[in-house]
Image (cartoon, rainbow, N blue to C red):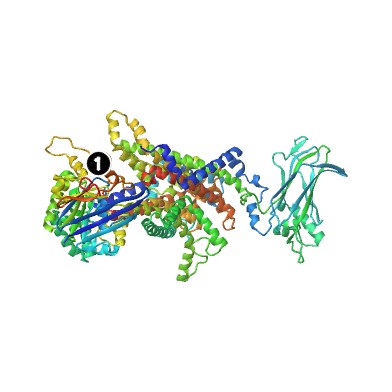
Amino acid sequence: MMVLKIRDLYLYYQTLRGEVKAVDGVSLDIEPGEALGLVGESGCGKTSMSLGITRLLPKNVETYKGSIELEGVELMTLTNEQYRNDVNWQKISMVFQGAMNSLNPVLKVGPQVAEPLVIHREMKEEQAKVEVLEIFDKVGLPPETYDRYAHELSGGMKQRVVVAMALILNPPFVILDEPTSALDVSIQAQTMNLLKRLKKERDIAMIFITHDIALSSDISDKMAVMYGGHIVEMGSAEQVILSPKHPYTEKLLASTPRLRSYSQPDFIPGAPPDLVNPPTGCNFHPRCHMVMDICRERDPPTCYPEEGQRVECWLYGDKNE
Amino acid sequence: MGFSARDALSEFWTSRTSKMGVALIVILFGISAYVLVSYPLNFGTQYWNKPQHWADYPKGVPPSWTQTFSSVRKPEHMILTTDVSEKRTRGIMTIDFNINFDLRADIFPQFTSFSLSDLTFYDTPPIIHLTLTKPDGSKIEDLLVESVPYPPSGQEPPYVKYVESPLRVYMPGSPAVRNAIAGYLRTEFGSTLTPLEIRNMGLEQFLFGSPDEEGEFTNIVEGTYNLEVQVEIFHEDDTVGSVKFVVGGQVYGFMGTDTLGRDLAVGLLFGFPVALFIGFITSTLTTIVGSVLGITSGYMGGRVDELIQRVCDVLNTLPQLPILIFLVFILGQNIWNIIVVLVFFGWSGLTILIRSMVLQAKQEQFIEASIASGASSRWIMARHIFPQVAPFIFTQMIFFTPGAILAEAALSFLGLGDPTLPTWGQILERGFQTGAIFLGYWWWIIPPGLLIVVTSLCFVFIAQGLEPVVNPRLRRMR
Amino acid sequence: MRLGRSLLIKALSLLMVVVVTLLLMNVILGATGFSDRMLGALVNEQVRVYRQGLLGTIANPDEITRIVAEHEETLRRAYGLDQPWVMRLPQMIWRVMTFDLGEAKSSQTFTGSTLIKDLIAERLPKTVLLITTSVALSAFLGITIGTKIATKPGSRLDRFFSNYSAFSYAIPTWWTGLVFIMVFAVFLRVLPAGGMYSSPPPTESIARFLDLLLHAILPISTLVLALSGAWIYMTRTMVLNTAQQDFVNVARAKGLPENLVMRRYIVRVAAPPILTNVILGLAGSIGGAILTETVFGWPGMGLLYWNAIVTADEGLIIALTFIFTLIYVIARMILEVLYVILDPRVEY
């Protein structure tokens, strides 16, 4: 059974400039224990995706519809209260962008990690502490960390605390939004290793959000490329990295510097689309190096060029529909 | 900086409060300009604080326009002067003046007074006789008989008197008048009231009233009154310039009067430029001192920074008002001391804020570049640091102004204000000290406070309007 | 232990401030010639009394003049008037620090003592009562209303209170006190016009308490009106800033109930900067108390201060300035301790 099945998810915000189509009809599947890497530039809607799945919606949400099935249960029909009590953190937890500020600065970190146990499992704090120390051990934190404050910990340690906190209730599914972007490279490597190990040990399904396609390939089983509120390409990590179908994916890969290559990294001309007034037809057409007339006029269809790989691009569809 | 002056202005102008603030400030400046042009600078010592100047004003009366809301008709204040005289010789030589006036009211006037100006005599000093004829024909003969005092020995005729300050008789305070009234009452009504009783009951009811069935003088005789002034002279060349008769009203003017008779409208007017002056000077000085020290402290660091910070710490640890009171008390109550003392307390807050802003700005790359290219500290502080903090400094300056005005008002209220300058706080202090509150003299208490509030508000509005300009996070998205 | 040490340092530095202030005050008194005049007047007064006393006993006028001159010399030496004021500094400072504050010119305690020390002891509790009640009430209003309107920024309630805060900055508190008296005591006659108790005060304790309450309503309302405006707005700002932080989102993602998020992740985190602002506003509260006591005739130290100004009683003014500084420093210290408890990030 799928852990997560999303169909036609829409999330629009109302702003002073107009309606922002942050998530514009997104569908995806995640198997148990599978890591989906969600890749894209800033402002393409990846964070909005995570907010949509966890229902941490800001106040100016205009449209929020679609289907989100978690372990067979349709989440969209749940009330906010049910979401908070049963889904948040117990079924889906999150590691936020900027772990630096994810911890309450005036409370000790240990009780913060224990908090979900106290609230959702109604444990006493002494009981919860035992479990917290256990998971601290699993992520490689010394037990004294329990009584520390956030400002007393290094960046890497804070990251581990945040990961421990996300896993404390042993959820089947975790969303990690740019978990390493604020860290220096060596800590980044440590954290990635930790995540990979935990994924294997606990069989956790995850969405790993990042703008760094190379980083994503390190941990992801599947990869989805997001652009302008759409998932323009999705497939296994090998498929996407080694045989990208969408022109945008190609360019993304080409712009990543290689260790053993002499060629200059490429760049993508133009700027990300305005989500209030997206371009007509395919969102990417103004910047596409393979653009055709039909791209400017009509939204591209979802095509399946290979088994398990899908792409939204006129290059692979039937042009006469 | 990315935000031009034009953008700043248009951002500022969008808010309704900004517009109100600017409108108010224009009005304030206009009134202040008018006051500075029409009143002497030493108005305080020359006129406001001299009780003689206000002698003929009614004491503690509400403004005239309160009449429109009241069913009780109060007499207006009447100052009746004439210089038209007739010289007559019918046995005795007299210079006669005639004053006619109308009285229609439900309440008796507050007082009466008589003045004579510009007297020249050559022989025996003249004697003044007053006769009041009421509309119903009742006449008080020789209501007042006043002899001009003899000139001191050694002086030669012609004797010129009452040019600078007139001969003035405050009728309720004159025993002669009381006696005359006692006599009048006895003759006309058979009353046995003594002059002392008349004094205690108040003259005006007898001058302007008529008795009812019980003999109480509660009804006002309405109509045209005539006052005959006969100055008995003893030399044909004696002259009199003018005479004045004041019927004290129960209402006066635009803002009423205080217990000294001072026209509150005039006092309040004078408060406008004073308030603006205090506000601006204090906030400008505070801002200058605060920002110079803040920029220096933040940029130079090291011992200078330490020292300035220590001083700020000490100043912040002091309770403001008690120390202000102490300093003004010891150093003396004049406006410059007050300003200096206010500045003394004001700059430390700004210095700390600016210092932290400068510390942040110091980290910027272009500062490093400037240093690397050999610019002096002063150059960098003036050319690079200052423009970054300038908008904030400007806003703070606007924001300080009402603080200064309020602080001065508080000091004045406690009695520590500059006695030579009538400020709104001083007017309130007088009101409080003389118990005007308990007498319900709202026209004395409410307007000065309101003016303080409105003046402060206009600066607050402007400062609020400037906030989005200075703090980009608050800007409205376009 | 780090906590204890940093607090000790803070306490010592605050004490230093008091001492420095005292020093500076005395320097100013000396340098402006004020203390010379003051002490001179004191000596003259005592000499006059002495001379009066002598007139009754000794007949010879020359003899009297000689003895009086001698006495004056002794007095001048005793007060240190024969030296420049700088020499008098240490003694003056010592006297004040040991609360040997001298006598008041024209004020007396209930029991008839004119010692400033006794006057202050008598008046202090009344001022403390006024200030702490008003500050507590204002803080309560500030936090409850401030957090409430911060949850819905831009709403009508929010705009109302934001305007209220702006307004209350521009209004002189003492003036609102005057207006209150006129409206409630003079025109409507529902509340007393001033003082702390009626005269004579009721003897039975409940009636006495109610009488106190009745007299306290207007002064406390005036002070609260002055303080709450700024505190409501400040709390609102702090809470809004804190509510945007990442850890608040994390708390919500954890599925915590909203009121727990509010308490533990927003208010608790915003508490230290709020407290800082309260500390900064404390000086204003003392000033406000002085003005309010004057307006309402509340028999505390503020009213004493005003009496001292009106009667130009220098000794009392100096003593009161010192005491007020001391009170302020102590209150600061208490709040600083509170701050350290609330914010573990603080280091010295």
User: Residue B8's image quarter?
Assistant: top left
Q: Reply above or below: B320 against C113.
A: above
Which x, y percent locates residue C207? 47, 70
Which one is in front, C301 or A292? A292
In the picture, measured across the screen, residue B224 lies left or right of residue A49, that is right
* Residue A58 point in image, percent of width and height: 32, 55
Pointer 1 local density, CA inside 10 Å: few below 14, some 14–19, many at least 20? some
- Residue on which the image places disc 1: A291
Residue B74 position by quadrant = bottom right
Q: Residue furthest top?
A: B374
| B247 to B186, vertically: above or below | above
A26 displayed left or right of B1: left
Q: Secondary structure at mark 1?
A: loop
Q: Residue furthest front?
A: A320
Instruction: Tell me which residue sits at (54%, 48%) in the image.
Output: B451
Image quarter of the N terminus of chain B: top left
In the depicted view, which residue is nearer to us: C180 or B239? Answer: C180
Q: Along the horizontal axis of the image, is B97 left or right of B45?
A: right
- Which of B47/C261 is in front? C261
- Observer able to see residue C90: no
Q: Nearer the viewer, residue B351 or C238?
A: C238
Q: Quarter of the image for the C terminus of chain B: give it.
A: top left
Residue A32 visible in the snapshot:
yes
Q: Quadrant of residue A74?
A: bottom left
Instruction: Report the amino acid beneath label 1.
Output: Val
- Total numbered badges shown on the rendered structure: 1
Could you say where residue C73 lies in the image, as x and y percent from the top left?
47, 43
* Chain letter for mark 1: A
